[in-house]
């Protein structure tokens, strides 16, 4: 234990004395949390819309007024001719264009079916489809009032776990896992590669340290630093983004520790395969991108093809995202997230055992 402790202290000293390592530890996590927290959002607000109202009746004007009063559309460009709608979309002035036909009010009063032409900018397909849903909701409410002959139905909506529908409440807790993963993979991959480049790795091999002690001494610093980085993001979520932590702090940190163990195993596997720090960096980002894309952070795992969902079984970030959002927003107990916790234990055991086996082969 004393030899392992000396190696751990040595690893912390090497990381702290290196300017690049200090920069990696403090600056990127803060910048990434701020960027992802504000930029990584699927919300669509302040959308510019072009409206060509050919109807001079009441309901045509009422529909245009409701579109203009919506908080989702900030700029309503009124166009007199349909030919101008194409140029408005081509020039990216708007992502959605609506044409109200000239007989709109007459057909509404007659109770006949009415068609509205909606043009979408396919270059921004996701944003335009969300904007189309906003427009459809406005039309649906107007239609409900007309068909009800003055009878208005008020919808009282309550959103569980995120009452103000703030998208940061969804993204920022997930950043705990992403930033922890980035830091752990970089530290574990670069530590061994740095030793090889400086020529000190051979000194470790001829030292009294066994291969197991070297692996433990390389693992624990990355593990502790990863949890510390996760703590930094947790504090930013609590005090900067004002996201309440509903669940148990102990359960959160137990899950962070299990997730850090799993990611440490992946980092050791990378370090066992590379020879230089540049190769370690490339290997880290090569592995990191699939981990994030297959975690459910960007798109739900359930929406992926079945063969791709099978690949996410080995992704520790997938399970940690479920855990951290449940602890942060839902106040879940251990019994609820026990399957995810056990999955993290299984992934951690598999990655660590495989990495140690590869690492010992390299040492031999």
Image: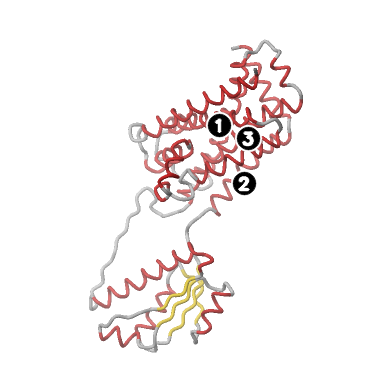
The answer to the question of whether label 3 and label 1 lie on touching residues, with beta carbons closer than 8 A, is no
Q: Is residue 24 above or below residue 82?
A: above
Pointer 2: residues within 10 angstroms few (<14), some, or many (20+)? Answer: few
Pointer 3: residues within 10 angstroms few (<14), some, or many (20+)? Answer: many
Q: CA distance from mark 3 to mark 1?
A: 10 Å
Residue at 56% x, 79% y: name it. Answer: 87
Which residue is under mark 3? 186
Q: Is residue 1 above or below residue 118?
A: above
Q: Nearer the viewer, mark 3 or mark 1?
A: 1
Which residue is under mark 2? 31
- Left or right: residue 268 versus residue 137 is right
Q: Nearer the viewer, mark 2 or mark 1?
A: 1
- Left or right: residue 256 versus residue 193 is left
First in sequence, mark 2 or 3: give its number. 2
Residue closest to the far right: 198
First in sequence, mark 3 or 1: give its number. 3
- Left or right: residue 49 versus residue 138 is right
Q: Position of residue 281 (x, y in %)?
A: 66, 38
Q: Position of residue 303 (x, y in %)?
A: 41, 51
First in sequence, mark 2 or 1: give its number. 2
**The C terminus: image quadrant:** top right
Q: Secondary structure at mark 1?
A: helix
Q: Is residue 240 above or below residue 280?
A: below
Q: CA distance from mark 2 to mark 3?
A: 17 Å
Q: Position of residue 229 (x, y in %)?
A: 57, 35
Residue at 59% x, 38% y: name it. Answer: 182
Q: Secondary structure at mark 3?
A: helix
Residue closest to the far top: 208
Q: Secondary structure at mark 2?
A: helix
Q: Position of residue 354 (x, y in %)?
A: 53, 25
Which residue is under mark 1? 266
């Amino acid at each position: 234990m004393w030899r392992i402790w000396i190696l751990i202290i040595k690893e912390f000293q090497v990381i702290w004395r290196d300017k690049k390592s200090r920069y990696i530890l403090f600056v990127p996590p803060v910048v990434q949390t701020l960027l992802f927290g504000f930029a990584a959002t699927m919300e669509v607000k302040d959308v510019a819309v072009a409206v060509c109202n050919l109807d001079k009746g009441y309901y045509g004007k009422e529909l245009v007024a409701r579109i203009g009063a919506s908080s989702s559309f900030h700029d309503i460009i009124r166009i007199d001719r349909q030919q101008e709608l194409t140029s408005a979309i081509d020039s990216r002035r708007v992502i959605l264009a609506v044409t109200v036909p000239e007989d709109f009010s007459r057909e509404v009063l007659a109770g006949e079916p009415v068609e509205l032409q909606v043009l979408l900018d396919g270059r921004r397909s996701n944003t335009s489809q969300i904007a189309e849903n906003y427009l459809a909701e406005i039309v649906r409410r107007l239609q409900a009032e007309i068909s009800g002959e003055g009878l208005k139905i008020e919808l009282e909506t309550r959103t569980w776990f995120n009452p103000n529908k703030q998208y940061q409440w969804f993204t920022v807790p997930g950043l705990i896992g992403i930033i922890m993963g980035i830091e752990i993979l970089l530290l574990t991959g670069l530590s061994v590669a740095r030793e090889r480049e400086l020529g000190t790795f051979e000194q470790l091999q001829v030292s009294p340290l066994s291969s197991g002690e070297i692996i433990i001494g390389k693992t624990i610093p990355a593990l502790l630093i990863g949890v510390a980085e996760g703590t930094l993001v947790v504090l930013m979520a609590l005090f900067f983004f004002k996201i309440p932590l509903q669940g148990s702090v102990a359960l959160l940190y137990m899950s962070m520790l299990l997730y850090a163990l799993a990611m440490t195993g992946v980092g050791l596997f990378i370090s066992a395969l590379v020879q230089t720090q540049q190769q370690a960096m490339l290997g880290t980002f090569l592995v990191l991108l699939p981990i994030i894309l297959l975690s459910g952070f960007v798109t739900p795992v359930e929406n992926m093809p079945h063969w791709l969902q099978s690949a996410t079984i080995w992704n520790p970030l997938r399970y940690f995202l479920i855990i951290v959002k449940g602890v942060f927003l839902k106040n879940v107990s251990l019994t609820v997230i026990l399957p995810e916790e056990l999955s993290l234990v299984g992934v951690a055991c598999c990655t660590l055992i495989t990495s140690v086996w590869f690492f010992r082969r390299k040492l031999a």
